[in-house]
Amino acid sequence: MAKAKDTKSDSGAITAYSVKTKTKNVPMVDPVIDVKSGRYIATGKDADGNKMAAIMSKATAEEHIKNGNAKKGTGWS
């Protein structure tokens, strides 16, 4: 059984854990990826408007931006 990644679903959208609803792989709406202290952090909201965040690798962040799943935020060089 293959393990699913927390920051990527089959549709290509960025997903994360929702602390408020305690559910995994919730798709983010309009995610923005910032670079803070060398970490790539996607921030956005779920369909209900709850704030979410996901930390990912540089390669994953660049792939999401290239595919149009997210926008670049602050900290990119």
Image: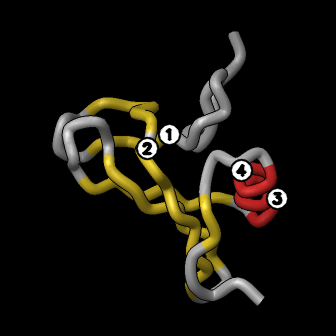
Q: Which mark, by number, is residue 28? A: 2
Q: Amino acid at mark 3?
A: Ala
Q: Residue 5: x and y, percent? A: 63, 35
The relative height of residue 21 versus residue 57 in the rendered view (above or below) is above
Name the residue tied to disc 1: 15
Q: Earlier in the sequence, mark 2 or mark 1?
A: 1
**Cβ–Cβ under 8 Å for marks 2 and 1:** yes
Q: Element type at marker 3?
A: helix
Q: Calculate the distance from the C-alpha at mark 4 to the C-alpha at mark 2.
A: 12 Å
Residue pictured at 80% horizontal, 53% vertical? 66
Q: Which numbered mark, 3 or 4, is in the foreground of this view?
A: 4
Name the residue tied to disc 3: 59
Q: Which mark, by number, is residue 67? A: none
Residue pictured at 65% horizontal, 22% vertical? 10
Q: Earlier in the sequence, mark 1 or mark 3?
A: 1
Q: Residue furthest top?
A: 1
Q: Which quadrant would residue 62 be assigned to in this image? A: bottom right
Q: Residues within 10 Å of mark 1 (few under 14, many from 20)?
A: many
Q: Calculate the distance from the C-alpha at mark 1 to the C-alpha at mark 3.
A: 16 Å
Q: Which numbered mark, 1 or 4, is in the foreground of this view?
A: 4
Q: Residue 63: x and y, percent? A: 80, 51
Name the residue tied to disc 4: 64
Along the line of sight, the residue nearer the viewer: 76 or 58: 76
Q: Calculate the distance from the C-alpha at mark 3 to the C-alpha at mark 2.
A: 19 Å
Q: Is residue 25 left or right of residue 33?
A: left
Q: Amino acid at mark 2?
A: Met
